[in-house]
């Protein structure tokens, strides 16, 4: 299998993955590294399994037909990384990911839209930057949230709303959340990346309600969060939802235990936000 290593390396770069992520537990990272460098051959079964892990068929890999699928997948990976960095207030990573988005070619309408959304999230990802927005800037963001979205980039709208929820009044946010919950009430049929975005949106809305002493509005989003599929990608959001639920129902001891676990797991930023709640 000549040049397999080179093709795998190219595919990995296009997907924006590390060697560990690309190997996907199929083979060891050290062995995979040597495959990329041409020091080892990889068996057909292992190659097929690695490709399947990344939703690429054996035929697509060798025919070059995987390019469009790779582009879509790499965009999803970048956006998921951006969402994670935004929620962790990681300015350096946010800036790095915007740069990667701007380097993607060709710059389609969808990618340009993605970059605009990413920059808005970057500019508004903490409370101080949101507070510094002018009335006109806030209205411009709100207009973007309510512009027409097709099925392909509806995910972007959820991500955007999740990160700019603080610019809305509680009543405005309530209308948006209720509309989204109705639209995506059949949680079993939602694709994974949208489930993750929805879970974060619910937590951010609940957080908003807590900040503004409107905890009676938390019941519906908490129920929705609970009903989302129990996949590992939404575990953190569900843990945060359980924290807020314990606070609402006066289970302060349980809530404190959750915070301790989060601190031990490295989520200090999120815990600091939670400790501000009344």
Image (cartoon, rainbow, N blue to C red):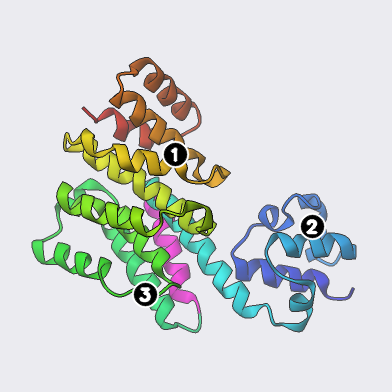
Q: Residue at x 41, y 53 (%)?
A: 185
- The tag earlier along the polypeptide, 3 or 2, is 2
Which residue position is annotated with label 3? 113
The residue lying furthest to the top in this view is 253
SS at mark 3 in the image: helix
- The tag earlier along the polypeptide, 2 or 1, is 2
Q: How many marks?
A: 3
Residue 116 in the image: x percent, y percent? 33, 71
SS at mark 2 in the image: helix
Is residue 217 toward the left or the right of residue 121 in the image?
left
Q: Are marks 2 and 1 in contact (CB under 8 Å)?
A: no
Q: Nearer the viewer, residue 31 or 260?
A: 260
Q: Residue at x 41, y 42 (%)?
A: 225
Is residue 242 toward the left or the right of residue 233 in the image?
left
Q: Nearer the viewer, residue 245 or 91?
A: 245
Which residue position is annotated with label 2? 32
Q: Residues within 10 Å of mark 2 (few under 14, many from 20)?
A: many
* Residue 129 shows up from this direction: no
Residue 85 in the image: x percent, y percent? 42, 51
* Residue 197 location, quadrant: bottom left
* Residue 256 location, quadrant: top left
SS at mark 1 in the image: helix
- The tag earlier along the polypeptide, 1 or 3, is 3
Task: Please identify the quadrant where the N terminus is shown.
Answer: bottom right
Q: Which residues are magenta?
A: 90-104
Which residue position is annotated with label 1? 226
């Amino acid at each position: 299998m000549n040049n397999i290593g080179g093709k795998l390396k190219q595919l990995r770069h296009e997907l924006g993955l590390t060697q560990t992520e690309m190997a996907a537990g199929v083979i060891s990272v050290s062995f995979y590294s040597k495959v990329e460098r041409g020091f080892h051959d990889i068996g057909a079964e292992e190659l097929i399994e690695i490709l399947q892990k990344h939703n690429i068929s054996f035929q697509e890999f060798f025919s070059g037909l995987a390019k469009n699928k790779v582009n879509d997948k790499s965009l999803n990976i970048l956006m998921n990384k951006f969402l994670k960095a935004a929620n962790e207030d990681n300015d350096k990573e946010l800036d790095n990911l915007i740069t990667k988005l701007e380097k993607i070619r060709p710059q389609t309408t969808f990618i340009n839209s993605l970059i605009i959304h990413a920059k808005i999230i970057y500019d508004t990802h903490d409370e101080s930057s949101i507070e510094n927005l002018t009335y006109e800037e806030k209205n411009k963001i709100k207009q973007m949230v309510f512009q027409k979205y097709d099925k392909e980039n509806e995910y972007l709208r959820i991500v955007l709303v999740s990160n700019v929820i603080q610019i809305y009044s509680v009543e405005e946010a309530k209308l948006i959340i209720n509309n989204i919950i109705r639209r995506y009430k059949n949680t079993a049929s939602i694709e994974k990346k949208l489930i993750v975005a929805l879970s974060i949106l619910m937590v951010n809305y609940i957080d908003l309600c807590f900040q503004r002493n409107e905890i009676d509005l938390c019941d519906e989003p908490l129920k929705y969060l609970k009903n989302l599929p129990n996949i590992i990608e939404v575990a953190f959001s569900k843990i945060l939802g359980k924290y807020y639920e314990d606070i609402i129902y006066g289970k302060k001891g349980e809530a404190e235990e959750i915070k301790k676990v989060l601190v031990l797991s490295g989520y200090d930023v999120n815990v600091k936000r939670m400790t501000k709640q009344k």
